[in-house]
Amino acid sequence: MRNPFRSEAEAFRFVLVCVALFAAVAVAGILGGGWAALGVFLVLAVAVAVYVKGEPKVDERPVWARRSGERRRILVVANETVAGRTLRGEIVHRSGSDANVLVVCPALNSLLRHWASDEDAARAVAQARLGESLAALAEEGVQARGEVGDADPIQAIDDALRTFGADEIIVSTHPPGRSNWLEKDVIARARERYETPITHVVVDLEHEGAAEARASAET
């Protein structure tokens, strides 16, 4: 069965709303009796319904029709591996000289800092990684643009697809055993959620670092 929530953060917000709703009803019942509790429940239920209905909807399975002559659109989603040579090589290989590339780097943050709206540090780190990746791609002849995305990679893809009609999605992770995204089945969930073709690129930063160290020692 498909999870009705787009992200863990969204599910957590729903739980908080439910707790707040029941707490308000309980307090109203204690202070004003049954009718007061019922009135508070109805008012809050209507407010929640209006809020949910008013949220912008995302097509969970976007199908983007490309007109003849239009450049291919490639969406890249990566965090710590965003500047990896393996990912960069894959982007260069798939984009060639005729593609519109958008690189999204989710701003990873602790749950406590996220709910405290303290995301400046996480966004700064993501922005620095993103800048390094875009500069390296430019050296390879790929003119890509980038943006910092939601901490949840699935939500980050949802947000990007609202304005960027991707023909292909590339998701980069650490190797199995070292990847938080793989532990959360991000690749499988994304492939179930979107019809857009998804390429999974594994980037071993430790291996790449060791290779660069050997190359430097030999020169």
Image (cartoon, helix red, strand yellow):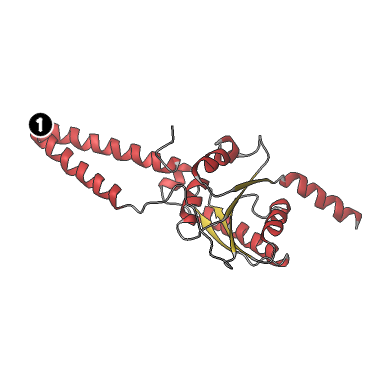
Residue at (22% x, 47% y) in the render: 47
Picture layout, residue 78 above or below residue 136: above
Judge from the rendering whether residue 90 lies leftward or rightward of residue 159; answer left or right.
Answer: right
Residue 33 seen anywhere in this rendered image of the structure: no
Q: Position of residue 6 (x, y in %)?
A: 43, 43
Dot 1 lies on which element? helix
The residue tagged 1 is 34
Q: Position of residue 152 (x, y in %)?
A: 50, 46
Give the quarter of the image for residue 19: top left
Badge 1 local density, few (<14 within 10 Å), some, or many (20+)? some
- In depth, the one of 165 and 204 nearer the eye is 165
Residue 89 seen anywhere in this rendered image of the structure: yes
Residue at the far right: name it.
Answer: 218
Judge from the rendering whether residue 87 lies leftward or rightward of residue 167; answer left or right.
Answer: right
Residue at (57% x, 54% y) in the render: 105
Judge from the rendering whether residue 85 lies leftward or rightward of residue 125; answer left or right.
Answer: right
Residue at (55% x, 58% y) in the render: 124
Quarter placement of the C terminus: bottom right
Amino acid under disc 1: Gly
Picture layout, residue 62 above or below residue 30: below
> How many marks can you see?
1
Q: Position of residue 153 (x, y in %)?
A: 52, 47
Quarter placement of the N terminus: top left
- In depth, the one of 184 and 120 nearer the eye is 184
